[in-house]
Amino acid sequence: MKSLLTPQKTLSSWWYGLLAGLRREQGQEFESLPLALARLDHQGAIQQLNKGWEELTGYSAQECLYRAQVSFVHPEDQPLWKQTLVRLAKAPLGAWEQMQLRFLTPGGERRWVEVRIRHYSRGFIVSLGDATLQVQEQQALAASHRSLCNLLDSLPAMVYRCRNNRHWTMEYVSQGCVDLTGYRPDQLINSQVVTFNSLIHPEDRDRVWTEVQQSLQASRPVYLDYRLITAQGTIRTVHERASGIFSDNGDVLGVEGIIFVSPAPH
């Protein structure tokens, strides 16, 4: 959950207009805003809602008024909602928070909503936005990322992405680095324990740097054979295939590729 406890002076102007209308008991602005809005009392019971709320949740005003909003929240998300109300009730007027929750429609459908809740003198103002498609896309992307990582980790090689500096600072390293170098990914990423350059045999370091830079300048793939010194102190000849990562302006952003043990000569 993203916490945005914010002083009143930093809130957007439409919040103030909305609250002013509520204080004057004028609901026109409340009703006309293109958002799902509700006003809750200090206990979290719905006191007022607009048409957008009915359209998003699927519940009529008669079904919602004077009921605790938490009753419309998925049971697994209800503790988060309750904790947020308690925390905001203790915060200064004007404080607000933002989170994603699952709401349950009358038909039992789960609907992800982006919730913004603000503390004001008579309770809370809540706005909802449908986040179902966004969450589904995020979940699909995360699943795809996990599948890709699992595939890369299963390869008998080290897949990597690094910065184009003399340390070859690693930003991503697959699990294959353990068999190749003797170091875990977390030890290589951001040079936490060793730099990748320090694993390259001292006699090969300058050549590797020069050949990679020449390939990047010519925008051609990198093909290299050189020696690595493993964590156990053994020397291993490896083959690397890589390419540059370039910005739209042609600037080198990094290098990505794969390194594996060179096949023994016949």
Image (cartoon, rainbow, N blue to C red):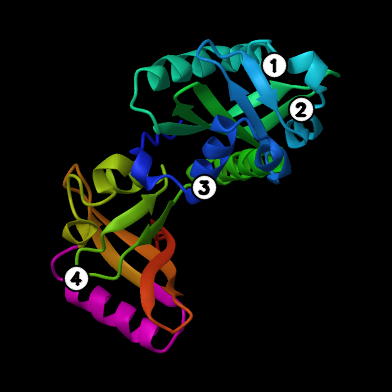
Q: Which of 30 and 240 is in front in this view?
A: 30
x 61%, y 34%: residue? 127
- The kind of residue tagged 1 is Phe
Task: Identify the residue position indicated by label 1 in the image.
Answer: 72
Helix, strand or loop under label 3: helix
Q: State if disc 2 and disc 1 touch (CB < 8 Å).
A: yes
Label 4 packing within 10 angstroms: few (<14), some (14-19), many (20+): some
Question: Mark 1 and mark 2: span between their CA atoms?
Answer: 9 Å
Between the C-alphas of marks 4 and 3, the distance is 26 Å
> Upstream in the sequence, badge 1 or badge 3?
1
Determine whether, in the image, residue 210 is placed left or right of residue 202: right
Please tell me whether mark 4 sits on a helix, a strand or a loop: helix
Mark 1 Cα-neighbour bin, 10 Å: few <14, some 14–19, many ≥20: some
| Residue 37 falls in image quadrant | top right
Q: Mark 3 points at which residue?
A: 152
**Figure check: 48 above or below 67:** below
If you read the primary sequence from the N terminus, does the residue marked by circle 4 or circle 3 appear first? 3
- Which amino acid, by three-letter code, is at mark 2? Thr
Question: As drawn, which residue projects farthest toward the front?
Answer: 24
Determine whether the residue tagged by mark 1 lies in a helix, strand or loop. Answer: helix
Mark 4 / mark 1, whichever is N-terminal:
1
